[in-house]
Amino acid sequence: MAYETILTERTGDVLVVTLNRPDRLNAAPPAMFDEIRDALARLDGARAVLLQGAGRAFCSGADVASGALASGDPAAATHAALTDHYNPTILAVARLGVPVVSAVRGPAAGIGCSLALAADFCVASDTGYFLQAFVNIGLVPDGGATWLLPRLVGRSRAAEMMLLGEKLPAMKARDWGLVHSVVSDEQLEHEALALAARLAAGPTVALGLIRRGIGQALESTLEETLAMEANHQRSARGSADSMEGGLAFLQKRKPNFTGK
């Protein structure tokens, strides 16, 4: 499908989604997040997703200069953009049945930071940085940032990012446990795609249930989590990949998972 603000490409079993407004550092109008959400709904058998940005940025944040956010009532327009466009896409990433990797070069700011960190793994280049600059213009974090960041780095470091509004360089983000790895700018696409391909070759049913389980466990009691795990294990145990994994173990060979 042709999109105006993103590009999509299948590389093996990986769906690569590229934010494609490099002249604007991939600043995201509401329509871009609608297109991302539409692409995620059209996996067509893809078993992992890679989110990346064209040019020298992942995403510099919401495109506040776009007509959608510059109406006569900017407060109402911003609320509508979040509830109708940006937030549903963050939820779509969180609820996706396959693993997601993000590749961050340059800024991942504002809603772009939330999108990058909503992935299961974030691979950053040495030019990458993360920014919650809302406080600098009298606004508050959005896109799930106040939910994501304390869970990823703890309350104190999340407060540092959001209350001070300073750039967090990729290497410091790695030290904080915010990103999976930091690589050279030249190696970013290769390393991120290799990780996505590794996940795409895995037991897709189990991986999807693991993603769901992590999200649910963050909000559940131990008792609820134990019951959830038992239900998920029942579903995973009935998959073809589970049978293949068991046979491969007994036969002392590498399993050939098909995603079923």
Image (cartoon, rainbow, N blue to C red):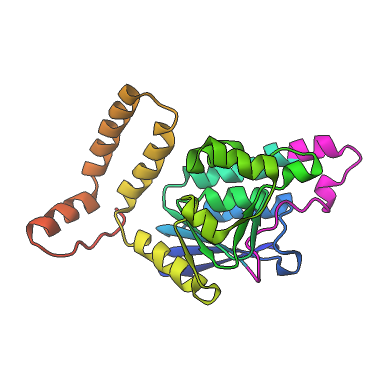
The answer to whether residue 226 of the structure is visible from this angle is: yes
Quick check: 6 above or below 167?
below
Locate the N terminus and report the quarter of the image it occupies: bottom right
When asked about the image quadrant of residue 170, the answer is bottom right
Q: Is residue 42 visible?
A: no
x then y, percent, for residue 224: 34, 24
Tell me if residue 44 is in the magenta stretch.
no
Q: Is residue 139 left or right of residue 228?
A: right
Q: Is residue 70 left or right of residue 149?
A: right
Residue 53 drawn above or below residue 119: below
User: Overall secondary structure of the magenta stretch?
Assistant: loop
**Residue 237 position within the rendered picture, expressed as x and y whole percent measured from the top left:** 21, 42
Instruction: Answer with left or right where residue 162 lies relative to residue 14.
Output: right
Q: Residue 143 sits in which quadrant? A: top right
Q: Residue furthest bottom?
A: 186
- Which residue is found at the position 72% from the left and 48% from the top? 133
* Residue 6, x across and y down, in percent: 64, 63
Magenta includes 65? yes
Q: Nearer the viewer, residue 49 or 55?
A: 55
Image position, residue 114 (x, y; %): 60, 47
For the point 68% across and 50% down, the residue is 166
Count of number-bearing discs: 0
Residue drawn at x 14%, y 59% as measured from the top left: 248
| Front-lying residue, 10 or 121 | 121
The residue stretch that appears in magenta = 54-80
